[in-house]
Amino acid sequence: MVWKTEGWFQTAFCKGFFRRHVIGGEGENTHMIRPLSIIFGFLALGEGVVYFTGIKLPGSIIGMGLLFAALHAGWVKTSWLQQLVDVLMGNLSLFLVPPCVAVMSYLDLVGRDLLSIVTATVVSTFLVMFVTGKVHEWMRRLW
């Protein structure tokens, strides 16, 4: 029996469905595999850095920094991640509702410690703004 190189599998999956919906392209049919692979790849890379170096930082933070560096260097294109970003931003309320419900569940604790929570929030906000301004001034003098 002679096998044809243009079989139904290759036609259906490699040229059709698989290319459009799994691998994706640059058009409207781009799927989530590539952006999720990039995000989780940098997460794994960050976890690997923590494992092998023993740095006392979360691997997700290191992975996010590495992803930022790769985006800034142009190794990862923003268009590769755009569809995932659009989906996540479109469903942002789903990520914010559970913490709000949790705060409402513990409203008695929040009410009891409201002054300390507000004080810590205001002081840390102004402290971050002050330190950021000073670091910016310092960096401007260096450059």
Image: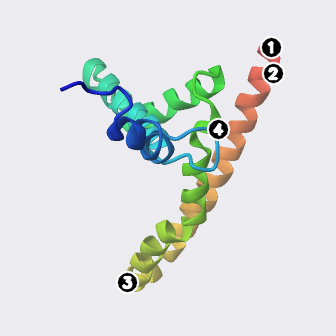
Disc 4 and disc 3: Cα gap in Å?
40 Å
| Amino acid type, mark 2 | Arg
Q: Can you give x and y, in whole percent of width and height, for residue 11 in the image?
A: 41, 38
Q: Which of 49 and 87 is in front in this view?
A: 87
Instruction: Tell me what residue is drawn at x 26 percent, y 27 percent.
Output: 3
Q: Please tell me the numbered disc located at residue 140.
A: 2
Q: Residues within 10 Å of mark 3 (few under 14, many from 20)?
A: few
Q: How crowded is mark 2: few (under 14 residues within 10 Å), some or many (20 or more)?
A: few
| Amino acid type, mark 3 | Ser
SS class of the residue under badge 4?
helix
Q: In this figure, which residue is indicated by the disc labeled 3?
A: 105
Q: Is residue 1 left or right of residue 24?
A: left
Disc 1 and disc 2: Cα gap in Å?
5 Å
Instruction: Tell me what residue is drawn at x 30 percent, y 18 percent.
Output: 53
Q: In this figure, which residue is indicated by the disc labeled 4?
A: 79
Labels 2 and 3: the sequence-earlier one: 3
Disc 4 and disc 1: Cα gap in Å?
31 Å
Q: In this figure, which residue is indicated by the disc labeled 1?
A: 143
